[in-house]
Amino acid sequence: MAYGIYFEDRASKVSFINALNESPIMHFFYFLFEFLFQVYFIASFLVIRKSKTVYLENYTNPNISILNALYKITILYYVLHFIVLIRWLVTFIFGVGEIRAWIVTLDGFAFLFCTCWYLFVALNKPEFFRGVNSQLKPIVELIPKQKSSPAVDDEKNKQILALKEFMIEKEPYLNSSLTIQDLAEQLKIPVKDLSALINLYMNKHFFDFINEYRIEKAKEILKDPSQKQLTILEILYQVGFNSKSSFSTSFKKHTGTTPTDFRKNPI
C-alpha cells in the first residue's frame, strides 16, 4: 500500500516519488489540471464581460474601474500560469535540478506579489467583493428583438420620441444614482420594456444614453457666461456625474475635447 512508504528510508521515498511522477496516472492528472485551468479562466473572462454589460445596461455611474482591475488581475494570473507550464517542461526535459529550483522560486514570488496586489486593491475598494446583482441579466437574454416591420418601427419610434421628450422636460439624469429601474418607475413602464427600447432599439447602453444628456447639460453650463464662476468639479456634480474621471472620459467621448478646452472654445 502507498501509505507504507512513510516507514521506508529516504532513498526508497525518493524512488517512489520519482516513479509516481513518471506514471501515466500522474500525467493524466497534469493534463486534467491544465484543461480545467483553461476552462476556469475562459469562464472568468466571460463572467467579467457579462458583468460589465449588465452594469452598463442598468446603471448610469457604474464603477467600471473595479471590473477593469479584476480583468487585469485575471490576465496577470493567466500569464503567470505559463511559469508553471515552463516548470513542468523543464522537469520533463531536465528532471529535478537547479534550473527547476530557480523557476519554482520565481513562480512562488510572482504569485505572492500578485496575491498581495489583489488584496491591496480589494482592501482599498471594499465594493470589490460585492459583485453584480445576480438578478440582473443582459437584456438580450431576457427579451429578443422583434423583427423589423412598419408597425413595430412606428410603435418603437413613438416610444423613443416620448422617452426623449421626458428626458428633456423632467431631467431625471441629474440624479447621480439614477438606475434603469428608477427611470422605468418614473415613466410607468416595465423595466424590461425600457431596457429593450434603449439597448436594442436605440442601440445604446443605458450608461451612454443617460450620459449623453448629462454632457449636453454640461455643455450648456460651460457655454453660459453667467456661470463662469462654477468650477468643472461643481458642474460635473450638478449634471449627475459623481467622479471627475468618469465625467472627463464621457465628455471627451461625446465632444472630442476636454471640459476645460470646451469652456475656452465652445463649439
Image (spheres, grey):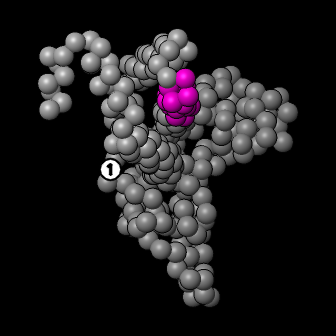
Q: Is residue 175 left or right of residue 203?
A: left
Question: Which secondary structure lies at badge 1?
Answer: loop
Question: 168 or 17: nearer the eye?
Answer: 17
Q: Residue at x 60, y 87 (%)?
A: 149
Residue tagged by mark 1?
134
Q: Is residue 245 left or right of residue 135?
A: right
Q: Is residue 5 left or right of residue 15?
A: left
Magenta span: chief secondary structure = helix
Question: 155 or 63: nearer the eye?
Answer: 63
| Spot occupied by residue 240 in the image (x, y as percentages of width and height) | 53, 38
Is 251 located above or below residue 196 in the figure?
Answer: above
- Magenta part of the protein: which range? 75-94
Image quadrant containing the N terminus: top left
Instruction: Residue 236: tell me if it is visible.
Output: no
| Spot occupied by residue 257 in the image (x, y as percentages of width and height) | 79, 36
The 10 Å Cα crowd at callout 1, few under 14, some 14 to 19, many 20 or more, is few
Q: Residue at x 71, y 42 (%)?
A: 253
Is 264 located above or below residue 99 in the figure?
Answer: below
Q: Residue at x 66, y 35 (%)?
A: 249
| Spot occupied by residue 29 in the image (x, y as percentages of width and height) | 36, 41
* Magenta region includes residue 73: no
